[in-house]
Amino acid sequence: MWVRSTMAYRTSFVMMTAGNFVSTALDFVAILIMFSHIDELGGFSLPEVAFLYGTTSAAFGLADLLLGNMDRLGRRVRDGTMDTLLVRPAPVLAQVAADRFALRRIGRISQGLLLLGWSLTRLDVHWTAGRVLLVPVMLLAGAVIFGAVFVAGGAFQFLANDASEVQNAFTYGGTTLLQYPPTVFAQDLVRGVTFVVPLAFVNWLPALYVLGRPDPLGLPDWVAYLSPPVAAACCVPAGLAWRAGLRSYRSTGS
């Protein structure tokens, strides 16, 4: 329904998608400005940073397209409109994800993929079958990891009622973090996003292997291939948290 509604005004859709493309591209403009004054950032060249940026932007864009409306959940909990979703014969999670589905968000995905394609033409990498396979795998696994964070953040809003900014700190904040090399951050932060909230498996760990760079934590190369099982593992606590949050919902009492 929302896609049909969007496509009813195609010129507006094109303009909104272009605006989404440009607004997200401004993040990389900031990186370009930095590289106009330096040759490397944390030991990484511009094509290597573009590779990090493109992979995380495309992975996050896909998760944001499918589950980005989870931040509206707190509003529904506060005003009691969550009740309307509970009486419909469809999964509540699917309804929340589809609520006001914003197709214009493909602008972020296309921007990330274009930048990723540009970086691949500039990288000096010895491409093996494993490295080639890791590129699409990290995009899909990264989208699942971000999706799990979206769902867990939505579950938290059942308790906090207004916690969209807490969720955004891990989703939008996480994708901004992963756009830069791990070597520019303190090791404690790198450990946190590796072993606590495993955002490093979105692109840092597989990207370091693709680029032939050592891991700052000294992890072995085979860790780069753990993104799919880590993504699957993230779905378990996110799903349990969602079910617990849904069971705790008590409406507004009005």
Image (cartoon, grey):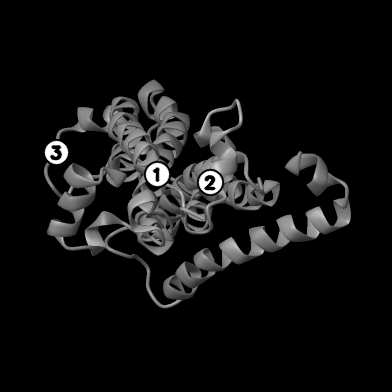
Mark 1, residues whose alpha carbon is within 10 Å: few (<14), some, or many (≥20)?
some
Inspect the image, locate mark 3, and give the three-letter code of the amino acid beneath it: Leu
Say if 136 sits above or below 42 in the image. above
Mark sitting earlier along the chain (2/3): 2
Q: Nearer the viewer, residue 206 or 41?
A: 206
Which residue does the numbered mark 2 point to in the structure image?
82
Q: Which element carries disc 1, helix, strand or loop?
A: loop
Q: Nearer the viewer, mark 3 or mark 1?
A: 1
> Looking at the picture, how far across and down is residue 198, in whole percent?
26, 42
Residue furthest out toward the bottom: 37
Give the labeled residue for mark 1.
Answer: 249
Mark 3 secondary-structure assignment: loop
Residue 42: x and y in percent read 27, 63
Amino acid, disc 2: Met
Judge from the rendering whether residue 12 lies leftward or rightward of residue 152; answer left or right. Answer: right
Q: Earlier in the sequence, mark 3 or mark 1?
A: 3
Q: Amino acid at mark 1?
A: Tyr
Residue annotated with mark 3: 219
Which residue is painted at 56% across and 68% down in the image? Answer: 26
Q: Mark 2–mark 1 contact, CB under 8 Å?
A: yes
Q: Say which residue appears at 32% left-offset and 36% top-offset.
A: 244
Distance Cα–Cα, label 2 vs label 1: 9 Å
Please tell me which residue is depicted at 53% across the width and 29% down the height of the picture. Answer: 91
Q: Is residue 198 above or below residue 223?
A: below
Would you call the spot at circle 3 few (<14 residues within 10 Å), some (14-19), or many (20 or more)?
Answer: few
Secondary element at image label 2: helix
Relative to 226, is 118 above or below? below
- Which badge, 2 or 1, comes first in the chain's sequence? 2
CA distance separating discs 3 and 1: 42 Å
Judge from the rendering whether residue 225 lies leftward or rightward of residue 104; answer left or right. left
